[in-house]
Image: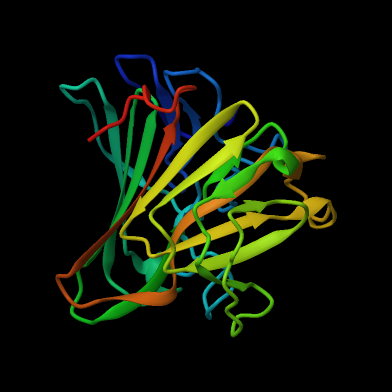
């Protein structure tokens, strides 16, 4: 699929994930329950050094979108990460950790001294992605971050996201306006680009024949994004009709930047759980 170095994780029960060192980018997840690919990856995505991969789970750090002076979505997603650890755990989980340390190249863009670690864990019906950021310098710094998760769906028009009722959100075009979502479920009928502030930590994405639980820890916000047909047609790395087969539900720390003092550390994670048909038998990691 690409000429970039990647790590393939496979748990003892057959669940698998693929992670490119370019961006520490998760590009595939197949839970053991169904064996289906649950992450969207555009067929037109370029796999080139210095370029972002369209789909999977891009790591957004140290800036979300264009909300600041840095390059859009920061530099983590286009940087070369290092494989720090790969192992099987006693419960059969396959785990890999990747690190990105500040360098002359990153400090030319952003002066902070940091160590970022991304840990990917797969087993059974569960994929957990954890981002850890440590301040290894002598100056306090602030950042925003997200796990820009592209979920593969059969048809986004028949997909709903449940669990956001009562949550404030802002549209990307109106950053100072915060209506409250009073709908029992969010339906995607066109372009959507919302930041839900102080969002619930448990959501469910429902399709006619399957469900996926989406859980977050450490990340206070949730971003929901689909470009819609018109906007998607302008994206050179989005395959035709690709927007109808994906929905981004992203764990994020966006509205209020994270501030880290010297020697401090911050951790945020997102866990995806493919739910069994009876909604009770999915295998979860503790």
Q: Which image quarter is the N terminus in?
A: top right
- Figure label count: 0
Q: Viewed as shown, does residue 156 lie left or right of 196?
A: right
Q: Which image quarter is the C terminus in?
A: top left
143 or 183, nearer to the observer? 183
| Residue drawn at x 58%, y 38% as measured from the top left | 206
Q: Quadrant of residue 225?
A: bottom right
Residue 251 in percent (x, y) is at 44, 56
The coloring applied to the image is rainbow
Residue 54 visible from this viewpoint: no
Residue 145 in percent (x, y) is at 43, 64
Q: Is residue 175 above or below residue 133?
A: below
* Extreme residue in the bottom direction: 176
279 or 177, nearer to the observer? 279
Residue 163 in percent (x, y) is at 49, 53
* Extreme residue in the top direction: 13
Residue 119 in percent (x, y) is at 30, 43
216 or 144, nearer to the observer? 216
């Amino acid at each position: 699929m690409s000429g970039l170095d990647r790590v393939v994780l496979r748990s003892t029960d057959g669940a698998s994930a693929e992670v490119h060192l370019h961006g520490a980018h998760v590009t595939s997840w197949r839970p053991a329950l169904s064996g289906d690919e649950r992450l969207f990856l555009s067929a037109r995505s370029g796999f080139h050094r210095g370029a972002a991969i369209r789909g999977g789970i891009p790591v957004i750090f140290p800036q979300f979108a264009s909300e600041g002076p840095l390059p859009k979505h920061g530099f983590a997603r286009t940087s070369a990460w290092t494989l720090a650890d790969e192992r099987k755990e006693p419960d059969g989980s396959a785990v890999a950790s990747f690190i990105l340390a500040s360098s002359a190249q990153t400090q030319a863009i952003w002066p902070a001294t940091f160590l970022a670690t991304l840990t990917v864990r797969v087993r059974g019906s569960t994929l957990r992605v954890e981002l850890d950021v440590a301040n290894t310098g002598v100056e306090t710094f602030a950042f925003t971050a997200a796990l820009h998760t592209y979920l593969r769906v059969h048809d986004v028009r028949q997909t709903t996201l449940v669990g956001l009722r009562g949550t404030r959100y802002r549209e990307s075009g109106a950053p100072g306006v915060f209506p409250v979502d009073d709908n029992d479920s969010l339906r995607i009928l066109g372009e959507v680009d919302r930041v839900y502030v102080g969002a619930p930590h448990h959501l469910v994405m429902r399709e006619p024949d399957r469900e996926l639980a989406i859980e977050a820890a450490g990340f206070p916000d949730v971003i929901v994004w689909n470009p819609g047909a018109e906007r998607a047609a302008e994206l050179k790395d989005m395959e035709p009709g690709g927007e109808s087969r994906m929905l981004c539900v992203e764990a994020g720390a966006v509205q209020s930047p994270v501030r880290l003092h010297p020697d401090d550390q911050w951790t945020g994670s997102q866990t995806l759980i493919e739910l069994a048909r009876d909604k009770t038998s999915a295998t979860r990691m503790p």
